[in-house]
Amino acid sequence: MMLLSKLRSLWFGVFRRPQVEHSMTDEVSFHIDARAADLIRTGVSREEAMRQARLEFGSLEKYKEEIRGARGLRLVDELRGDLRYGLRSLRRSPAFTMAAVISLAFGIGGNTLIFTLIDSTFLQPLSYRDPGQLAVIWSAPVKNLEQIGTSSVSTYFGLRNQNRSFESLGAFNGGGCGVKSFGMENDAAPAERVFGQCFSPSMFDVLGVKPQIGRVFTEAEDQVGNVAAVVLISDGLWKRRFGRDPGMLGKTITLNRTPTTVIGVLPSDFELFKDPNSTATRGSELDFVIPLELTPTQVQSKVGGLTIVGRLKGDISLQQGRAEIETIAAQLAISDPERHQDLSARIEPFRRAAYRDYRSPLLILEGSVAFVLLIGCANVAGLLLARAATRRNEVALRMALGGSRWRIVRQLITENIPVALLGGAVGLLFAGAGLNVFIAIAPHDFPRLDKVSLDFRVLGFTALIVLLTAILSSMVPALQIAKVSLVESLNDSSRSATSGISRFRLRSALVIGQIGLAMILLIGAGLMIHSFYRIVEKDLGADPRNLLTFEFRLTQNETIKPFGRYRGMGLWDISPVPAQRFERVLDRLQQLQGVQAVAAVNAAPFQNQAITMPFLIEGRPAPGVGSDEAPQTAHYFAVTRGFFGVMKVPLLRGRDFNDHETADSPLVIIINQTMARQFFPNDDPIGKHITLDWVPNERPREIVGIVGDTAATPLQRQQAPAIYLPHLQQTAKFTGPSWWIRSGMYFVLRTSVEPLSIVPALKSAVAEVDRTTPVADVRTAEETIDNEVRNLRLYMVLLGVFGAVAIVLAATGIYAVMAYSISERTREIGIRIALGAGSQDVLSMVFRQATFIIGIGLIVGLVGASALSRVLRTVLYDITATDPATYAAVSVVLLLTATIACFIPTRRAVSVDPTVSLKG
Amino acid sequence: MPQEAELLPGTLDLLILKSVSLGSEHGYGILLRIQKITAGALTIEQGALYPALARLEHQGLLEAEWGTSDNNRKAKYYNLTGAGRKRLKQETERWNRNAAALMTALKAQEIG
């Protein structure tokens, strides 16, 4: 209540000031007149009465001022005056203004830019009901709780049935069921590839998502082994294929050749983070949601695949939820060891799970722009310190007249606000431009890219930063000025060296800080640039130029039939149809114009998709079962003939597969060099036999060749061993949810023309063989590689820009401090020259000073960078965070920049004319 | 004539609140009232009244509006707000308690 009244009072004081003043004067005059009237009534003369009334009242001005103070107007007046002074001094010294504004604009602009990114990912509310209550539950091995992964159906059911902390629990799975081919009945167009999710019906409750039109599916429609053919389509798909026609409700579309009824449309702001199991894909939007489609085999399986999401009850905390699920997991491990042994459950807030990949880089970027801001503030602080000399007398006088130190400091900070505001305005321009550039070069799956914009929240943040900047940059000068002693300044000690020296020391300290920060930033940028360069130049083991790839995948029904169980996972019968189809497509494609050679492989090249296959080497003991030893595994590739030729992978020893390797001929296998080195260090692998350890009744395969290593992805940190089979010699059965690798192949075509130019011919050629299976994800290998490194490139560019800005700002700081020092010491230099010092001596004097500052700054920077090196480790590949070459290169850059910065002041020092300088 | 006493800090506010509680009044009238109810024992420089009035109005304990005085001149009249009434009551009780405690202490003949 009191606050409200005070605010209203202040409001009137600021915006209705003339009225307030009038009112004050009127009231006071009334009082004096009334008193005088009373005195007149007692017989005093008019003039005498007025005089006495005034005397009794006391000093008019003093009380008026006290009234103003009581209404809080004094503060307003003081602030207004300080601001006006600040503006005036800006106009008077345009050089200072420009330098200060530019110094601050980068820092403020950069912070605004990064904040916008952080805001749209981590701060803005997710589009679900009460998102703070949402949590994601993972499974993780008890021995290594960091290795979180998806959960088995059994875990999901167990948690769902036994928990008491969650209002609702749901699961989704994008991996096996999220990629479908989509078509319309009676539609002449070839099938299109769409991506979606499989939801348990409870997921809609958990997320609080309601369809735009239609309804969500019910529990009855998602029973194990009995799933209704219903689908909810996304707003995007609805718009794209059906023009938002509400008549679509109830119509039938074909998903993977199965007629499916559209029962609803998802809201336009529906979003879901990328399922960790999902083999899709770059920048794919969600097109549909179907029921979980659990088969009895899956229910029995111990293998994961489900991502569990829960909505905690209102009064239950995350901690309590965590305790409960851990208990349930432990109980399951005891009651059902076959499926749950050695597994525990982990829980984390939904948002953290969604944006985990971006946390580290965004933090690094935020740290960088914070540095840039600090460096900019240090520049302004230095400039203000230089101007401090002229203010000394004024300040001393104020303090002598009773002003408090705090008042002085507040005044200096307030005067700085106009500069900071200007810097903020320019900074916003920078941020806006930077944002446009960012959106252009950012990877498509950067979260909520379409929502990234400068809005009011961002402006509010910028305003805060502006205030902070004003305070930071004037703190040092303000405190220094306020320390001024009365006697010293009133004695006109402009010639005294003492305060000049202390100012110089302060400025030097600021510059050392600037250099240190700039170094840290530059080293970070340098490391990223170095890392990126190494990745891009890395020999991938295969030639990605003029290489076109596409995915050709059949449906689940066409590929597998349940057979039984093996080692806790479902065992499937693999149909021979897919392999035959692949061969026919291969034959047809070989006749295409512009194609030099074509082959196919079961895992998308350079996208780190291969599964790991355990194996046994003939004549060697199997690795201990249940021991802590890692099982013998290698990346598993099933290829058509001619694969190595198409990819230009060198054959190092032995022979390639030939045209006669079929299911009936002797089983052969090719290994890569890493596999040869790791498992056959002392003998020749050729001729030895390997047995895969995946399904029952595996037969041994003879190693016939060794090929060069191929990088799984440009970003791989370690080369893995790999085995290659002729795809026709794969087993007739397969186990586990990774059966999908048997359903499709990635065709690779080496072209003699521009790869993308043959796409139309490609599509019709494939359609000749198979109308209903789409040609999906057509792209060049170079595009794939580019996508893989897109994130890295983005961070590198940003960090590089910030680093460059930082070093330029720091260089300005060096220049300013050296110029200041030399101008302060002009008299001294003049004396020395008059006493016979040559330019050599003057130079060495300047040199010593500069070396000291730059040297300490360099050391601070190097030490700081190595201390912070851990932070960068997650975004660096192929080099250590303390890579000496980078550190050395950056140091050289800094020394060069610093030398250039010192150039002009040094020349000025040498050309001092003693006669001029000694005159003072 | 009772001894004139220096005004203790904070008591001016209380006196103002008390006088205004007796009825809406302008600044000069409040001054006269204070002189009357303290029987002239407490003196203040006249001008000092107004910063106090401004402070109380700023804090929402008094509200003011312009009106006409008995001699037809424009004057600013003050009223107690609800908050002001509450404050007056609180402060009065506090003063009574303190005074009573002090009186008891000063009357004590011996320890214990």
Image (cartoon, rainbow, N blue to C red):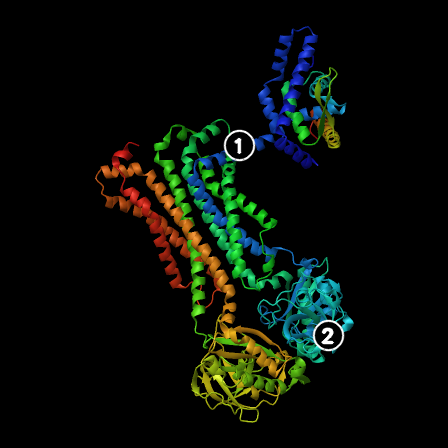
Image disc number at residue A81: 1
In this orientation, does residue B76 appear?
Answer: yes
A358 relative position to B73: left or right: left
What amino acid type is highlighted by mark number 2?
Thr
In this orientation, does residue B108 appear?
Answer: no
Q: Quadrant of the N terminus of chain A?
A: top right
Q: Of marks 1 and 2, which one's residue comes earlier in the chain?
A: 1
Quarter-wise, where is residue A682 in the image?
Answer: bottom left
Image disc number at residue A260: 2
Looking at the image, residue A281 lies above or below residue A597 = above
Image disc number at residue A330: none
Tell me residue A434's x, y (percent). 51, 54
Residues at discs 1 and 2 both on one chain = yes
Tell me residue A877's x, y (percent). 47, 67
Other residues around mark 1 within 10 Å, as few (<14) / some (14–19) / many (≥20): some
What amino acid type is highlighted by mark number 1?
Gly
Chain letter belonging to callout 2: A
Quarter-wise, where is residue A238 in the image?
Answer: bottom right
